[in-house]
Image (cartoon, helix red, strand yellow):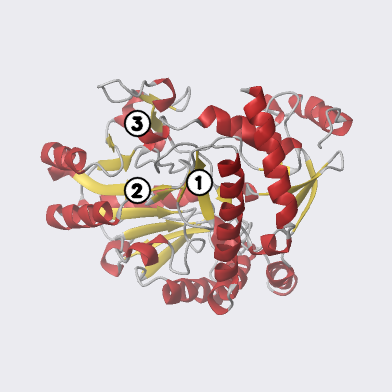
């Protein structure tokens, strides 16, 4: 059972409030005055807070940790780069092509790439390249997808304040203040897996649609996934309209399969974004795709500009090279898949014992848990699930030493190091947490 009195955490938050808004470096790390987490160490699949509480972690920093925290196979390559090459120079090294060629060997959708430092930067680069190539403006996005923290994609369907029986679509609202209304001018939102909606959008705006931007498996929406037929629909409508298909694989890339989500669907994007799992926790990202599209990045008149001081730094690329090599040459992803399936099986036993209707969405390496009879087909369907019960269950898990996001829109992320955990203990903890959740409802 976690401690109710956490003096070190309380003192750290008090100090942090004098230095940062909300006392944190990222707004989503603020969990309130009593529950904001301050860590002292991480190793394998566990994290330890500054009050010496250790948790088995299924957040994994929202997905980057694919092998485990402080994996020596990766860290030693980074140390070698720092010691023998350097960290950053403003020039190129052979590491650039080493990593791109590794990615190309795993992902046949990639001809050429450029690097970035975060998923947000990768999406910015991909969208700009799509517009430069097509000479069009509008980007079609899918409800429930998350594409980073830049103004244009920080508009969302307000499903939280939408009623399931409302015939009108949810209102489109900004994530918060400071996002100009003008940034929504060229963004069009559609529900996932809705053929009529995508047809209507292309009928109205087709001549100016540069690209469709989609997470085929939505990492911020409980791993709700596109159907095979819908992905084919998007591929076909882009081809017939001269638009590009951008798949955001910031979360799925090198996690759900060696070739990412496109290996699962066997449908390839024109442009793809990667980050997170490609570096096992180091800040590295990339975007790439067809050569003719990527070659829009040039110094020619009308060429697309892309760059960044920290882009392709040696710390990031040495981590990516090591991580991708491990994923390519070992059975790490098969292990992760097996562990994820095992955890879903034991969770299902617990839920069934308490007569809780449940279903799982997405792949075993980043599965969503939904309390309801049917797997949601889009963000609006998620509203029909019993997310309140899930939140109480998740909060109880945290109290009992299992760390996850207490929101069913966030998946359970699995890493290779989870194979070492005590699964019998996890089932016992899940059973106690569910019993307490039901008693509290």
Is residue 349 depicted above or below 182 in this figure?
below
Q: Quadrant of residue 107?
A: bottom left
Distance in Å between CA atoms under marks 2 and 1:
18 Å
Q: Position of residue 65 (x, y in %)?
A: 63, 57
Instruction: Nearest to the eye among marks 2 and 3: give it.
Output: 2
Q: Quadrant of residue 424?
A: bottom right
Is residue 360 or residue 293 the one in the foreground?
Answer: 360
Which structural element holds mark 1?
strand
- Tell me, for residue 183, which label it has, or none: 3
Q: Please say if 23 is above or below 298.
A: above
**How many labels sit on residues?**
3
Q: Element at badge 2?
A: strand
Q: Tag 2: Cα neighbours inside 10 Å, few (<14), some, or many (≥20)?
A: many
Q: Compared to 180, does 363 lie above or below?
A: below
Tell me what residue is drawn at x 43 percent, y 44 percent.
Answer: 147
Q: Does residue 375 lie above or below 337 as drawn?
A: above
- Label at residue 368: 1
In the image, residue 152 lies at what x, y percent? 38, 36
Q: Is residue 329 visible?
A: yes
Residue pointed to by mark 2: 214
Horizontal side, residue 14 vs residue 299: left or right: right
**Between discs 2 and 3, the one toward the N terminus:** 3
Disc with the residue nearer the chain's start (1 vs 3) = 3
Q: Which residue is found at the position 40% from the left and 43% from the top?
A: 375
Asked which secondary structure carries label 3, the reply is helix
The CA span between labels 2 and 3 is 18 Å
């Amino acid at each position: 059972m976690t401690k109710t009195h956490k003096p070190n955490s309380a003192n750290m938050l008090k100090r942090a409030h004098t230095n940062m808004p909300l006392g944190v470096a990222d707004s989503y790390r603020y969990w309130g005055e009593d529950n904001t987490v301050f860590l002292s160490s991480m190793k394998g699949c566990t994290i330890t807070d500054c009050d010496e509480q250790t948790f088995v972690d299924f957040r994994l920093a929202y997905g980057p940790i694919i092998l485990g925290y402080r994996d020596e196979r990766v860290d030693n390559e980074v140390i070698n780069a720092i010691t023998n090459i350097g960290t950053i120079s403003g020039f190129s090294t052979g590491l650039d092509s080493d990593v791109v060629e590794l990615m190309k060997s795993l992902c046949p959708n990639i001809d050429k790439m450029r690097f970035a430092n975060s998923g947000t930067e990768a999406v910015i680069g991909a969208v700009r390249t799509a517009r430069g190539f097509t000479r069009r403006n509008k980007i079609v996005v899918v409800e429930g997808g998350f594409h980073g923290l830049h103004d244009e994609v920080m508009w969302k369907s307000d499903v939280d304040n939408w009623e399931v029986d409302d015939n009108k679509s949810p209102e489109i609202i900004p994530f918060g203040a400071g996002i100009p209304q003008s940034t929504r001018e060229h963004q069009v939102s559609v529900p996932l897996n809705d053929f009529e909606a995508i047809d209507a959008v292309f009928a109205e705006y087709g001549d100016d649609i540069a690209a469709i931007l989609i997470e085929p498996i939505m990492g911020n929406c409980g791993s709700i996934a596109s159907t095979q037929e819908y992905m084919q629909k998007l591929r076909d409508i882009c081809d017939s309209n001269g638009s590009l298909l951008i798949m955001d694989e910031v979360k799925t890339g090198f996690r759900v399969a060696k070739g990412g989500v496109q290996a699962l669907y066997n449908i390839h994007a024109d442009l793809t974004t990667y980050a997170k799992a490609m570096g096992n926790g180091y800040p590295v990202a990339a975007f790439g795709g067809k050569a003719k599209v990527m070659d829009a990045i040039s110094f020619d008149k009308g060429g697309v500009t892309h760059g960044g001081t920290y882009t392709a730094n040696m710390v990031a690329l040495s981590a990516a090279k090591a991580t991708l090599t491990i994923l390519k040459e070992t059975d790490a992803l098969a292990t992760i898949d097996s562990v994820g399936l095992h955890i879903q099986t034991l969770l299902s036993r617990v839920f069934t014992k308490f007569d809780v209707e449940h279903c799982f969405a997405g792949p075993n390496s980043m599965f969503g848990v939904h309390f309801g009879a049917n797997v949601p087909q889009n963000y609006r369907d998620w509203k029909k699930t019993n997310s309140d019960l899930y939140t109480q269950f998740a909060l109880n898990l945290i109290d009992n030493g299992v760390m996850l996001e207490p929101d069913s829109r966030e998946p359970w992320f699995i890493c290779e190091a989870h194979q070492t955990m005590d699964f019998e203990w996890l089932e016992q903890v899940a059973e106690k947490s569910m019993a307490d959740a039901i008693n509290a409802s």
